[in-house]
Amino acid sequence: MLKRFRPKWQHGATAVLLTLLVCLPFDWFLPQYTTLMIFIGLSTMVTVGLCLLMGYTGQVSLGQAAFYGTGAYISAALTKTCGFNPWLAMLLAAAGTGAFAFLIGYPIFRLKGNYLAMATLGLGLILYVLFRQLGPGGPSGTGDIDILSIGSFGFDTPFRRYFLVWGFCLVILVISQNIVNSRTGRALRAIHGSEAAAESLGINVSQFKVKIFVLSAIYASLAGSLFVHHLRFVSPQSFDFIASVKLVVMAVIGGLASVWGAIFGAGTTRLLSDEILLRFGEWDVVIYGLVLMLVMILMPDGLFVWLKGVFENLRTRLRQGKVET
Amino acid sequence: MSADQFLQYLISGLTQGSIYAIIGLGFTIIYAVTRIINFAQGEFVMLGGMLSFILASAAGMPLPAAVVLSIVIASAVGALMYLLAIRTARRASVVSLIIITIGAAIFIRGIVGEAWGVDFVRPGFFTGRTSIEFLGAFIHPQAIWVIGTTILVTIFLHLFFSYTMTGKALKACAINPVAAGLVGINAKAMALLSFVLAAALGGIGGAVMAPLTFTAYNAGLMLGLKGFVAASIGGFKSQLAAVIGGFMLGIVESLAVAANWGPFSSAYKDVIALIVLLLILLYRSGRLAEEERTG
Amino acid sequence: MRNYFKWLGIITLIAALLATGGIACDGEEEETPTPTEAPTATAEPTEAPKEAYKVGAVFAVTGGASNLGDPEKKTVEMMEEQINALGGVNGHPLEVIVYDTATDETQCVTMATRLIEQDEVLAIIGPTTSGESMAIIDTVTTAEIPLVSCAAALSIVSPVEDRYWVFKTPQTEVEAVNEIYAYMQEKGITKVAIITNTNAFGEAGKTYLESDAADYGITIVANQLFNPEDVDMTAQLTSIKGTDAEAVVCWSTDKESAVVADNMMTLQMEIPLFCSHGVANPNFITQAGVAANGVKFPAGKLLILDIVPDTDPQKSILTQYTAAYEAIHGEGTINTFGGHAFDALSLVTIALEDVEDGMSLAEARAAVRDSLETAEFAGTGGVFAMSATDHLGMAPGSLAMIEVVDGEWALAE
Amino acid sequence: MSEPILETRGVSKAFGGLVAVNKVDMAIEPGRITAIIGPNGAGKTTLFNLVTGVYAVTEGEIHFRGKPLRKSPPHKRAKMGIVRTFQNVQLFGNMTAMENVMTGQHPRSSYGFLEAALRLPKSWREEEDIKLRAMKYLNIVGLGQYARHNALSLPLGQQKLLAIARALATEPQLLLLDEPGAGLNTLEKRELSDLIKRIQEMSITVLLVEHDMPLVMGLAEWVIVLDSGSKIAEGTAAQVQKDQKVIAAYLGEETD
C-alpha cells in the first residue's frame, strides 16, 4: 500500500456509507430504492473500468456500452438458446469480451485522443448493429432469461439481486483500488502523464494500454451479464451510442481519476435521470442537458473532485478558525 | 443490374452523400479551429429544417424568407452555444468538451420538442415535386437542390479559406493556434466564427434537405452521427476531405443495398460504412506515427 | 470576467440543484405515506385503498416513439379529469401516475418497478412500444400486478399461460397483416415486395408478413430493410423496382413510411403502397402530402369516424373520445395511439369497480386482474371480450382498410 | 582502453530529404563522463533519440556493451540499462515526487496485474523495496523532504533533479542527460555538476548533451562535437577547444 495521506474522517465516511449500503433494501429503510440502486451498482461496475481507462491511463472510449452489451448478449444467448449454466455463461462472456477487447486493442490503441474517440465510437455502433441483427430476438430483444442461483437459493427478488450486484461491485472497486496503488497503477498514470517518459523508463506503453482496455471490457461484460439476469430481458437499445455517452458522463462526473468517484458518478447521474428529473415532467430532458453542461463547465474535474475540494477548504477554514480562537 | 438501375443507386448514394457531407463540413470547421468534436452539429441541421417549417407554415412567411431566417437563427444558436457553453468552459479536457456539446444537443432537442411538438414535419419544396428523368433514372427536384447546395457550399468555403483575410486567419488557427496568436490573430474570435459558420452550414443543410427527408425534433442525433462518420472518413483534415467522406459514405450505403447479400445488405450498410471508417483511421494512424518520427 | 462567469454559473447551478431538491422534497412529502404505510397496508388490510385508486402508466413520451407516447399521455390525463369529475370509481378518486420511458426498455423497467414498489399502484397501463412491453412482462408477473399494454406485438399476450397478468388493447400486427393480405387476395395481387424498419415494430411486422404470405397465395419477391431515422430509401426501392412485384408493403411508423411513399413517387413506381397501422396518424397525410395519396393501410375506425355507420357498436364511444380529445388538442389531432390508451384505461376503470374496501394491495391487484379477464367493452380500437384464453379478446372486423384519397381518409373499396 | 559501453558505427538518420545525423561513429568509454556539444540543429538530440530507440536508424548500427541494439523499442533498452532524461523535463504531473521516482523502479520490479489486484505477498514485498530504493534516490538528489509534493509544484531546478532521480531509479548503466543545465542558475548548476560526479562514482556512465560550455568543460572528460549531423571533432575539453573546425562551427553559428 502506498503511503497515502488518509484523514480519519475518510475511514469514518467509508464505514457509514457501507452501513447505509447494507441497510438500504430492508423494509424498515428505503426498500423502494432497491431497483434504482441495482442499476447504480451495474453502472458503477462499468464506470470503474472507464475511470481506469480514461482517468488513469488517459485513453478515451466512446463505445464502452458495447462491451456491456457483449457481456449481456453472450450470457443471454448461452443460457437461453444453449441452456448453459448462468454462472458458466457469465464466465465465458467475460472471457469472450476480454479476448475481443485484446484483439482489437492493439490496432485501435495506435490511435490517440480524438481519433481514438472516433474509433471507439465506431466500434460501439458496429456492435450495436450486430446485437440488433444477430442477437436473440433481434431488435425487439428477448425475455424470460434464467435467474442466477446458487443451488436452491435463487436470486429471484430485487432484494437478493441487490446484494449480488453490490457484492460484485465492491469486489471490483477494491481490486481496482489495489491496481491503482500498485506498480501497474503507476505505469498507467505515467502513460497519462507522458508517454515518452513512461516508455523511456521501461514501461511497455502499448501493452499496458491494451491490458487496461481488456480489464475495463471484462468489468463491463460482468455488469452486462448481471444486467440480463436481473432484468431477465435484453434488447439492443440498452447498448446504443447514448448508453455509451451516459457511461462516459458518469465517469467524468465521478472525476475520472478516482475509483470511488465512480460510485458517486453513477449514483448522481442515475439519480438525476431516474428520480429528480421525473418531478419536472416533460422538461426533464431539457434540464438534464442543462445540468450536464453546467457541471462540465464549472467542474471540469467532475462533481466529485469539486465537492471534495470544497469540503477540504471548509475543514481547513474551520481549523484556522479554531487556531485563532 | 441494368445500367439505369446502377445510375439510380448512384444518384441515391449521391443524394444521401451530400446530406452527410454538408453535416460533416460543420464538424470539420469547428474541429479544425478549436479541436472540439461538436456533437450538437446534428441539432443545427434539425433547427434549420424545423425552423424553416415553423416560420413558413405556422408564421406564414414566404418560404425563401423562412429559409434565410432559419439559417440566421441557427447561426445565432451556434454563437450562443460557443459563448455560453464552450468559452466559459476553461481547462476542460477533450472528454468534458465532448460532453458539453452533447449536453447542448440534448438541451436544444428538448427545447424544440417542447416548443413545436414531437410530430415529424416537412417544409415546402423549393421547386415543385415532379421528379426529373435522367438516362432512365429519376431524381427528386429537391435532391438536386441538396446536391447543388453541397457543391456550392464547398466551393464557397474553398474560396473563403484561400482568398479572404478572415478565411486565411481561420486556416492559420487551424494549422498552428500559437503561431496564429503571435501574428495577432484573435483565436477566440476565430473559434466563435467557426461555430457560427458550422451552425450556418447546419442550418443551410437542414433547410435544404428537410423537404426531401422530413425532419423532427429528434432527427439531429442520427444525422449528426452520420455526418460525424463522414467527417472522420475525411479525417477532420480539410473541407474537401469531409465532402468526399460524405459522398463515400452515401455511395457505400447505397451500393450495400444494391448488393443486398448477407452482410452486404441494407441492414448492415452502417456496419460497412463504419468498418471503412476504422480501416481508414488505422491506415492514417500508421502514417501519423511516421510523421511523428520524421517530424 | 472569468470569475464573473464562474460565479454566475455556480449560482445558476446551485439554484438549479436547490430547485430540483426542493421539488424532490415536495415529492417526498406527497409520498411519505407510501413507505411508512407499506408494511401496515399488508398487515391490516382495512388500510389499503382508503384514498385514491392509483393506476400507473408508462409511456414513451420522449425518444423514438414519442409521437405515439405523447397522445397516450394526453389521453389518460384527460380521462383522469373526466372520471374524477364524475365522482371517480366506487366513490374513490382515480389517480393516474404517468412516467416517461424515453422509449428505452431499461428505463421502462425501472419506472414500472417504481410504480409497483414505490407508488403501489393497482394496475399499470402502457408501455407504448412492443420492446418495452416485452421488457416489463417479467417484472409485472413476478410482482403480480395487472398490465394492460398499448403496444402491437401479439407475443405480448401469447402464449397466454405465460401472460397471466398481461393484457393489451391495440390490434396486433397479425390482424393488420391478415387485413392487408386478404385485401390483396381480393384484388388478385400475388407478388409483393416488403420493406421494413429494423426496429422492433418493423421486425414484428416482417415476421408475420413472411410467415402468413403463403396462406393468401402471395409470394414475397423482394425483402428490403432500412434503419430507424434513415432519410432516403430510394436505393432499396430501386432494387424493388427491378423485380416484378405488384405491390409494396412498408412496415414502419409514420416518418419512415412517409419517406418510402415519397421515394416511390420520385422513382415513379406505379404499384400500390401498403403501410402498417403505424401510420394511422393525421400528421402522416399532412406531411407526406401528394405522396400519401393512394397509400393503403389497416387501421381502427377512429380515423374514419364519419364513415362508420351509426349501427356500429363502437360509434358512440368513438364519437365521445374524438370530441373530447379534439376539444382540448384541436381539430384533426385525433389518432389511434391515444385510442389504445383510452381503451386500456377504460378497461382498468371497469375492472377497478370490483375492488372492495378492505382488500390488501395484493388482493386488490388480483381482483383487478380477474375482472379484466372477464371484461367486455366496446372501445375505440375494437369490441373487446377478454377471456382466460385471450387477453386481447378483440372481435374480428376491428380494422378497416383505409386509403388516402386527395389528402383524406377513406374506406378502401 | 577497455571495451566501449556504447558504440555507434556509421549511424545516420534522415527525415525525408534532410539528413539530421550523418555517419556518426562514436565510442563511449564506460565510467567516463562524455559530453556531446555542437551548435543548434547539429543533431545532438536526434542522436539521443537514436540511442534510446525513439527513432529507428536509417543506416548504421548501435552496439550496447558489444551487442547490436537493432530495432528494440525504448522500453526494452531501458531494461537493458540505457535511460535518458528530457530537455523538457517530462515529469508525471499526476503524481508526487516520490511516485515519480517509484515509477522509475518499473524495470527493476516484476509483479503484475494479478498480484496487484489481489495484493499477493509478492506485490507488497516488492512495494516495500521499491519505496526504500525510491527514497534512496530521492535523497541522492537531495529531494528527500519533498517526497509527498506534487512533482510539478517544485521549482524547475528541483524538477530537473527529480527527473534525474527518476532515471537513476531504473538503475541504468548508461545515463543520457539531455541539456540538464538548461534554465538553471549558477548555484543550481554547481549542484548539478556535483550530482553528476556522484553519479559517476556510482559507476554509471554518463553521456550528456549540453549547451553550457563552462559546465561541460568542468565536467566532461571526453567531448564529442557535432555540426550539421556529422562528427567534426572529439577529444578532451582542452583539445576540442583548440580545434579549428570546432571554432569555425561555433563562429559560423554566431555570425548567422
Image (spheres, helix red, strand yellow):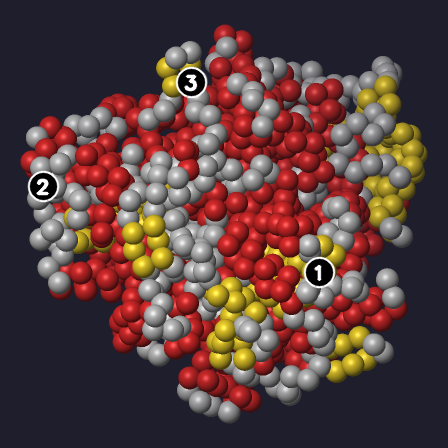
Q: In the rendering, which numbered label is found on residue A149?
A: 3
Q: Examine the rendering and report whether any part of residue A32 can be seen.
A: yes
Mark 2 → mark 1, Cα distance in angstroms: 59 Å
Tell me if label 3 and label 1 are in contact, CB under 8 Å: no
Q: At numbered mark 2, what does the secondary structure look like: helix, strand or loop?
A: loop
For the point 74% across and 25% down, the residue is: D77
| Dot 1: chain letter | C
Q: At numbered mark 1, what does the secondary structure look like: helix, strand or loop?
A: loop
* Residue beneath disc 1: C190
Q: Amino acid at mark 1?
A: Thr
Mark 3 → mark 1, Cα distance in angstroms: 52 Å
Q: Amino acid at mark 2?
A: Asp
* Residue beneath disc 2: C357
For the point 35% across and 79% down, the residue is: C331
Mark 1: give few (<14), some (14-19) or many (20+) Cα within 10 Å: some
Residue C168 in percent (x, y) is at 38, 49
Q: Quadrant of residue B9?
A: bottom right
